[in-house]
Structures are given as C-alpha cells and as structure tokens.
Image: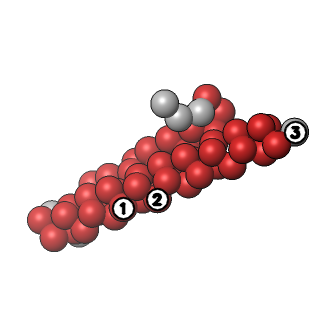
Amino acid sequence: MELEREAVAYTTGKQTQFNEALEDYLKSLRQYLKDNLYNTKELEDVYYHLLMVKLLSKHSSELHGIR
C-alpha cells in the first residue's frame, strides 16, 4: 500500500513539474511574440494554437504519463 502511494506521489509531482515548466516556456514565448509582432488576427490565432498545445500536452501527460 505504501509503495502505491509513493508511486502516485511521484507521478503527480512529475506531472506538476511538467505542467509548470510548460507554462513557463509558453509564457516566455507569448511575451516574445507580443513584443515582436503586431496585434493582428494572426497573432490571436497563434495564441489560440499555443493554448491547444498546452491543453493537449497536459492531456497526453495525464493519459500516457511522462518519460
């Protein structure tokens, strides 16, 4: 029973670390794009797709785990 709890805690910690790192990278990328591109429909589309990257990455990590 203790081993199962440790495995769950390890997996949860690894997913949390992954999600926080992904958010940091995406935040930096969004800021870089905002600083260097004009505020256009295309930029809004890029932001939308970055959101999709975040959500699908999170879903994949929950479904299949993290290496």
Residue 42: where, in percent of width, then height? 27, 55
Image location (x, y in percent) of residue 47: 36, 57
- Does 28 sit above or below residue 63? below
In the image, 64 versus 53, the foreground residue is 64
Q: Residue at x 65, y 33 (%)?
A: 63
Residue 60 position (above or below residue 46): above
Residue identifier under label 3: 1
Q: Identify the residue at horizontal 12%, vertical 65% (top origin).
A: 36
- How packed mark 2 is, by other alpha carbons closer than 10 Å (few <14, some 14-19, many 20 or more), is few
Total numbered labels placed on residues in the image: 3
Can residue 4 be seen here? yes
The residue at 82%/43% (across/down) is: 2
Closer to us: 19 or 49: 19
Residue lying furthest left: 36
Q: Is residue 44 visible?
A: no
User: Residue beneath label 1, please?
Assistant: 24
* Disc 1 residue type (three-letter): Asp
* In this view, the mark in front (2 or 3): 3
Query: What's the residue type where badge 2 is placed?
Result: Glu
Mark 2 or 3 closer to N-term? 3
For image coordinates 87% across by 39% down, the residue present is 1
Colour logic: secondary structure
Alpha-carbon distance for marks 1 and 2? 6 Å
Residue 32 tag number = none
Identity, as a three-letter code, of the amino acid under mark 3: Met
Q: Are marks 1 and 2 in contact (CB under 8 Å)?
A: yes
